[in-house]
Every structure is written in C-alpha cells, then in structure tokens.
Image: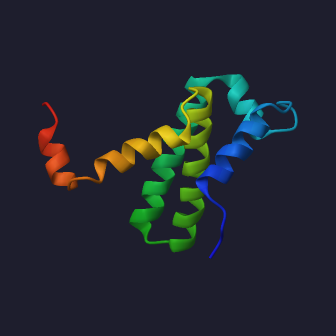
Amino acid sequence: MTRFSLSDLEAIVAERAQASPESSWTAKLVEKGQARAAKKLGEEAVETVIAAVSGDRKELVSESADLLYHLLVVLKIADVPLQEVLGELEGRTVRSGLEEKASRKT
C-alpha cells in the first residue's frame, strides 16, 4: 500500500502551480483560470463515471486519479485548502448520510 496522500498531491499541485506554464500542466491550467480548470474537472468526472459503469477497474483507477488531481487544481485556484474540505467531510460523519440529507432545506 502506498503512503502517498491527497495532502502530498495538494503540495505538489501548489508547487507546480508556481512553475512556468511552458513546463507544467498544472501551471498551464492555473494560468487559464478557474473556468477552464473546472471544465477539465467536469470532463474527468464524466470519464470516471464511464469507467465505473463499464466495469473496467484499471480505467476506473486511472480516471479517478485524474479526477482527484483536477479537483485539487480547482481547489488551489479557489484558494480552498484540502483540509477545509476534509473538515466538511468529517463534520458530515457524525450522522448517517440519510439523516444529513433529510436535514437539508429543500
């Protein structure tokens, strides 16, 4: 099992966001702005869904990695730390998903 974490990836994204767009895909996405990065995130989400539905495990793993990477780029551009998202998730674990969903205003 790998010891690589989403926090590790967040740090790499932050570092590469400062690089030259000519040498870094991350920097290129950051330079193009949130709309482009979010569009790419959406594309990766669709590809992840297709891989999940097709039952292709290898493709699902690959597309999931792309999806997580692009999510972290979008968060970086928005200046939202991963820890903030994890805190939100942690707060949601105090009750079941069905209870949490029922408590939301419609």
Q: Position of residue 47 (x, y in %)?
A: 50, 52
Quadrant location of the C terminus in the rendered image: top left
56 left or right, relative to 22: left
* Res 82 quadrant in image: top right
Residue at image point 66% right, 62% down:
4
Q: Give the camera-side residue of 65 and 4.
A: 4
Q: Quadrant of the N terminus?
A: bottom right
Residue 90 falls left or right of residue 77: left
Between 86 and 23, the one lying in front of the other is 86
Residue 86 percent coordinates (x, y): 45, 46
Quarter of the view holding residue 103:
top left
Pick the front one: 38 or 1 = 1
The residue at the far bottom in this view is: 1
Residue 28, position as x, y percentages in the image: 75, 31
In the picture shown, does residue 29 fall above or below 4? above
Residue 68 at x, y percent in the picture? 56, 50
**Vertical relation: 82 (above or below) 18:** below
Which residue is located at x 14 percent, y 50 percent?
A: 99
Query: Seen in the image, is 99 located left or right of residue 32?
Result: left
Residue at 61% x, 47% y is: 69
Which residue: 48% across, 38% down? Answer: 84
